[in-house]
């Protein structure tokens, strides 16, 4: 079986960083040149943070079709039961990787963008009222939710596309939240407070793992 996890030699920076990083680097150079080195250093640090935020590490997902993987990096802030199954909520801070991945393999059966507000991502109102992209793959539904800072969700897949568990599917710019609804039969293996990684961490099993 292939190893599971991140490949530290396969880190890349998304092109989405360029509109933010390049102006900061140019300002840093100009300010440094005209003698405002300390201000230039601040813009240099800003450019470095932008590149850090838009990092996209390679991930090696578990090779088990019963595994339901985390669609996002971050912290589990809520695990609740409801009429539609168990809902897991993951909070992504600005320090987490913001590349979202498919939790399971299959065809994207639903892909709906909803306009909305921009409550703080850990606010419960964010799940219902915030700007979000709702998707469904097989029996797993999930929503990529923009937060107070995150103002744009960039989808890389569309309705009808076939994906494998762990495939990159979207990017949420800056702090955000991902809600995931699991079928009733799923065996949950995470709890509130746990940290998870997209495409790597197993949130639940369909049935008991061997």
Image: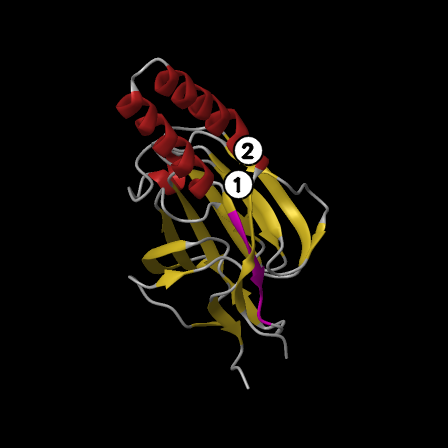
Q: Position of residue 187 (x, y in %)?
A: 46, 74
Give above or below for 104 relative to 29.
Answer: below
Query: Which image quadrant is residue 167 in?
Result: bottom right
The residue where tag 1 is placed is 171
Q: Which residues are magenta?
A: 56-62
Q: Viewer-proximal residue, 121 or 15?
A: 15
What residue lies at 43% left-to-right and 57% top-to-bottom? 83
Instruction: Give the distance between the C-alpha atoms of the residues marked 1 and 2, in whole angstroms.
Output: 9 Å
Q: Nearer the viewer, mark 1 or mark 2?
A: 2
Query: Which image quadrant is residue 16 in?
Result: top right
The residue where tag 2 is placed is 16
Q: Position of residue 32 (x, y in %)?
A: 36, 20
SS type, badge 1: strand
From this viewpoint, is residue 185 visible? no
Seen in the image, is 154 located left or right of residue 31?
A: right
Give above or below for 17 relative to 186.
Answer: above
The residue lying furthest to the top in this view is 34
Q: Where is the N terminus found, in terms of image quarters? A: bottom right
Query: Which image quadrant is residue 131 in?
Result: top left
The disc, 1 or 2, on the residue closer to the chain's N-terminal end is: 2
Q: Could you tell me if the residues under marks 1 and 2 are in contact, i.e. CB atoms within 8 Å? A: yes
How many neighbours does mark 1 have within 10 angstroms: few (below 14), some (14-19), or many (20 or more)?
Answer: many
Seen in the image, is 87 located left or right of residue 124?
A: right
What residue lies at 67% left-to-right and 59% top-to-bottom? 164
SS type, badge 2: helix
Residue 104 within the segment the image draws in magenta: no
């Amino acid at each position: 079986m292939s190893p599971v996890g991140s490949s530290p030699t396969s880190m890349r920076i998304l092109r989405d960083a360029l509109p933010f990083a390049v102006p900061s680097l140019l300002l840093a150079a100009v300010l440094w040149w005209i003698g405002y080195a300390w201000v230039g250093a601040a813009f240099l640090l800003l450019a470095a943070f932008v590149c850090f935020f838009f990092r996209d590490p390679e991930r090696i997902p578990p090779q088990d079709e019963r595994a339901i993987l985390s669609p996002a990096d971050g912290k589990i802030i809520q695990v609740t039961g409801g009429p539609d199954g168990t809902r897991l909520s993951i909070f992504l801070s600005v320090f987490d990787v913001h590349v979202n991945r498919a939790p399971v393999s299959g065809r994207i059966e639903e892909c709906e963008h909803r306009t909305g507000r921009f409550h703080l991502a850990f606010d419960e109102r964010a799940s219902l009222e915030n700007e979000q992209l709702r998707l469904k793959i097989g029996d797993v539904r999930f929503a990529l939710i923009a937060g107070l800072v995150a103002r744009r969700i960039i989808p890389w897949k569309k309705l009808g596309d076939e994906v494998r568990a762990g495939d990159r599917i979207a990017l949420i710019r800056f702090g955000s939240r991902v809600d995931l609804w699991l079928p009733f039969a799923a065996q949950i293996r995470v709890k509130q407070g746990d940290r998870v990684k997209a495409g790597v961490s197993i949130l639940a099993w369909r049935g008991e793992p061997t």
